[in-house]
Amino acid sequence: MERATIETKPRATGHARMDPHTARRGMFVLGDGRKVAFTFFLLVFLFALWGFCNGMIDVMDKHFQEELHLNLAQSAWVQFAHYLGYFLMAIPAGWLAIKLGYKGGIIAGLLMVAAGGFWFIPASHIAQFWAFLLGVCVIAAGLTFLETIANPYTTVLGPPQYAATRINLAQSINGIGLLLGPIAGGAFFYSKNAAGISTGSERLWIPYAFIGVIVVILSIVFFFAPMPDIEMEDDYHIDESTPDARQSIWSHPHFWMAVLAQFLYVAAQAGIFSFFINYMTSQVPPVPTSWHPPDAPASGFFAGWFETHANGALGFSSKAASNLASLGFLCFLIGRFTGSAILKKFTPYKVLGWYSVAAVALCLLIFAKLGWVSVACVFLTYFFMSIMFPTIFALGIFGLGQSAKKASSFIVMAIMGGAILPKVMGAVADRYDLSRGFIVPMLCFAFVALYGFIWPRLSNAEGAVRVSTSGGH
């Protein structure tokens, strides 16, 4: 049988070896023997929910570009409204998480998401850009509660050595939501009637009203569900200090550098996700006519996938690109599941560092405009981005005890990077082209790589999860 030895404490504690009984506990068993697998099972629905919402947002940009004749920088207001909700509610969400506990904070977030989803019904009648942006912002504000609470909660639902594994597993379910979001968005945002006229604006409310109904049901389930209020281990003895002498979380460089790394990572992710459809409809080489001969009837799943662009070349339509976005999120999902396995064998900060280096190289190849090679690199960036958010999160709140809830709110607040950098990427793309715009996420990934590689020095620890195996297979 395989035997694992785990080290999770900072160097200051002397690398204490964990009790072997603790090491053999399952991923979802608390120190007192309570099993919390059902609680974790409920949490993964929240991860799927915000993944679905984020997936739809990423195909909404192109819809508004076509309907309102916006350029790339202007359409990025959709991303701005989305991430503004995170920025505005991150601190209140962290405060309420402390006051209400995990359960109360989750229910508050679900009800806010429901309000934003139902708002899209009158917004479709108002039919103004600001009305849709308001709905996007309110939903994001509700999702902030869920992310602020659910992310750190997954890290304490079992032995600490599996914290990064649990959060990556939950984020894998988030990837399923991301996979389905673009499909739903493409079906409703780019729908046409029998006359070939777009009906996207009239039908945009349907998936959001559906979300509203689902989250109301989820809030009822969470109200009656058992949810133990568990605190993270206080490795730095923050909670033991007197109020006057208590350390600030900002005195820990592994935390505040995580805030900056998360800001830049989400900036890179939002830019790539939001302009994916634009890339597939403008930067992809001409599609071979053998894929879709001009005289072939358009029917079935691939109906409407190809169109002749302004330069006379055959290429992907917006509907096709929104479905291809799901393929990108499939790469993202595969990265999440394989990442969970990799993080059991290797230290998270090294995995984060090398995945980020790979993302830097891929962005450089996209920037170089190498035809279908660059197109393949876009999909590969999804794979290597997959583990970054949860891993940065787990590394950032490592060892902060009860202060992890407060720290979590700041790391979620850093999602504001997704509101700002896509506008920069859009401005570069408007001036040059979208391939050149990938210089922006490339620089962001370079900083994330730096954070990963220097994390042991920042945290004064060997690793949030250090697992060595011996004694068999």
Image (spheres, rainbow, N blue to C red):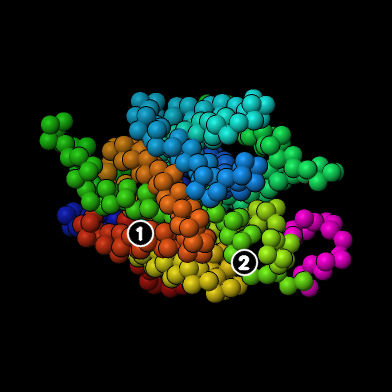
For the N terminus, the quadrant is bottom left
Three-letter residue code for mark 1: Val
**Where on the picture, by quarter, is residue 352?**
bottom left
**Structural distance between the alpha carbons of marks 2 and 1:** 28 Å
Frontmost of labels 2 and 1 is 2
Q: Position of residue 59 (x, y in %)?
A: 61, 48
Three-letter residue code for mark 2: Val
Q: Mark 1 — residue?
A: 448
Residue 284 image label: 2
Q: Is residue 163 visible?
A: no
Q: Secondary structure at mark 1?
A: helix
Residue at coordinates 78% horizontally, 43% vertically from top-left? 197
Residue neighbourhood size for the residue with mark 1, other residues' Cα within 10 Å, grouped as few (<14), some (14–19), many (≥20): many
Residue 300 image label: none
Which segment is the magenta one? 290-307
Q: Image height check: is 213 above or below 77?
A: above
Q: Give left or right: position of 55 versus 295.
A: left
Q: Give left or right: position of 416 versus 199.
A: left
Q: Earlier in the sequence, mark 2 or mark 1?
A: 2
Residue at coordinates 70% horizontally, 57% vertically from top-left? 317
Residue at coordinates 52% horizontally, 62% vertically from top-left? 433
**Where on the picture, by quarter, is residue 154?**
top left
Q: Position of residue 87 (x, y in %)?
A: 39, 37
Residue neighbourhood size for the residue with mark 2, other residues' Cα within 10 Å, grouped as few (<14), some (14–19), many (≥20): some
Residue 292 lies in magenta, yes or no?
A: yes
Q: Position of residue 262 (x, y in %)?
A: 37, 50
Q: Secondary structure at mark 2?
A: loop
Q: Give left or right: position of 406 versus 102.
A: left
Q: Taken as a whole, is the magenta stretch helix, strand or loop? A: loop
Q: Nearer the viewer, residue 405 or 40?
A: 405
Residue 229 lies in magenta, yes or no?
A: no
Q: Is residue 245 visible?
A: yes
